[in-house]
Amino acid sequence: MARAPQHPEVSEFELQQVLEAIVDPVRRSIVQQLDAAGHDIKCGDFDIAVHKSTATHHFKVLREAGLIRQYYVGTSRLNALRRDDLDKAFPGLLDALAVG
């Protein structure tokens, strides 16, 4: 398993993929929690009512769509909202979707 997961560049963001990722209530909650916190959050520290394997799937969908960036600090995988990148690619989209 790669230590640093792959993330799309801003130029690779696809609106359809972002919208499909954010339509799911669990994924939308993850994005909302990141936005409200204003800092990066460990995978296990989110308030979501799904099993670990399901949460892993949701994080992957968000990462592949470009909504979050994941990285390791020690053994913890942290998640960062890519708000600046999303605002660059799709200005105002997160605000319009009432995510933040």
Image (cartoon, grey):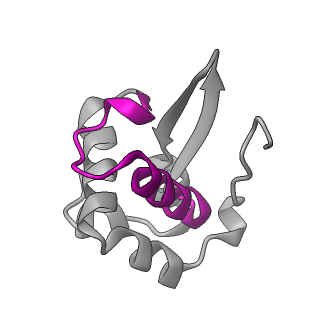
Quick check: 65 above or below 52?
below
Q: Residue at x 32, y 49 (%)?
A: 30
**Residue 21 point in image, percent of width and height:** 42, 71
Viewer-nearest residue: 59 or 55: 55
Q: Residue at x 34, y 50 (%)?
A: 51
Range shown magenta: 40-66
Which is the main secondary structure of the residues drawn in magenta? helix
**Residue 33 point in image, percent of width and height:** 26, 42
Q: Is residue 38 left or right of residue 60?
A: left
Residue 50 covered by magenta stretch: yes
Q: Is residue 38 left or right of residue 48?
A: right
User: Quick one: quadrant of the N terminus?
Assistant: top right
**Quarter-wise, where is residue 10 in the image?**
bottom right
Q: Residue furthest bottom?
A: 16
Q: Residue furthest top?
A: 74
Quick check: 73 above or below 93?
above
Viewer-nearest residue: 49 or 24: 49
Viewer-nearest residue: 89 or 34: 34
